[in-house]
Image (spheres, rainbow, N blue to C red):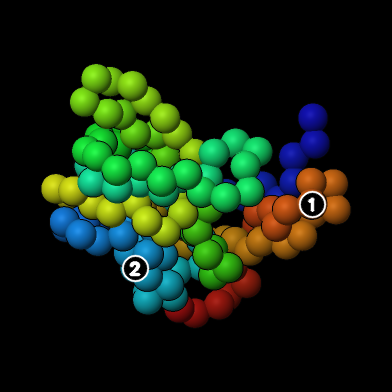
Amino acid sequence: MKTENSGRSAGTFHVIRLTPGEDLRVALAGYVQGRGIKAAAIVSAVGSLREAALRLADQKDATHYAGKYEIVSLSGTFSPDGPHLHIAIADSEGRTIGGHVVEGCIIYTTAEIVIAELTDVRFSREEDPQTGYRELRVAPAGGEKR
């Protein structure tokens, strides 16, 4: 097994509540970027959506869903290059679907999210010739000040 760019870091936790009508991806990316956070990860998330836009596995474009959905899982990382977020949502009958979060996931009642800011490392995304995608790179923070 090859492990690349792993690192250990101390952290600071941020607790965020998003309100009805906010776009999940836009709001979280704005929060992280606005505070100059260089590396972060989702720790916990609960809430609901009234619309969802997900890029499903091996699909180029987003699929849009209208209705009321519970957020049953949200995971991902944040770098200065932007977020990489995946979500699982459940409808009123408990059917669950998940995918890559794109703009258009609109909060229904609330989203309560805990983000861990990793203070000793810096995340970036660089083209990986093996996958063809911009993949996570981890580096020491290098004394950068926020």
Q: Amino acid at mark 2?
A: Tyr
Q: Amino acid at mark 1?
A: Gly
Indicate left or right for 7 with 67 as reference.
right
Is residue 86 placed above or below 79 in the rendered structure? above
Residue that numbered label 2 is attached to: 31
Give the residue displayed 54% in from the left and 39% down from the top. Answer: 56
Marks 1/2: CA distance?
29 Å
Element type at marker 2?
A: helix
Give the residue displayed 28% in from the left and 54% down from the top. Answer: 106
Is residue 14 placed above or below 8 in the rendered structure? below
Give the residue displayed 57% in from the left and 50% down from the top. Answer: 61
Is residue 107 placed above or below 146 in the rendered structure? above
Quarter residue 35 falls in: bottom left
Relative image position of residue 97 (x, y in whole percent): 42, 30
Q: Earlier in the sequence, mark 1 or mark 2?
A: 2
Quarter of the image where the N terminus is located: top right
Is residue 115 at least partly visible in the picture? yes
Element type at marker 1?
A: loop
Quarter of the image where the C terminus is located: bottom left
Residue that numbered label 1 is attached to: 132
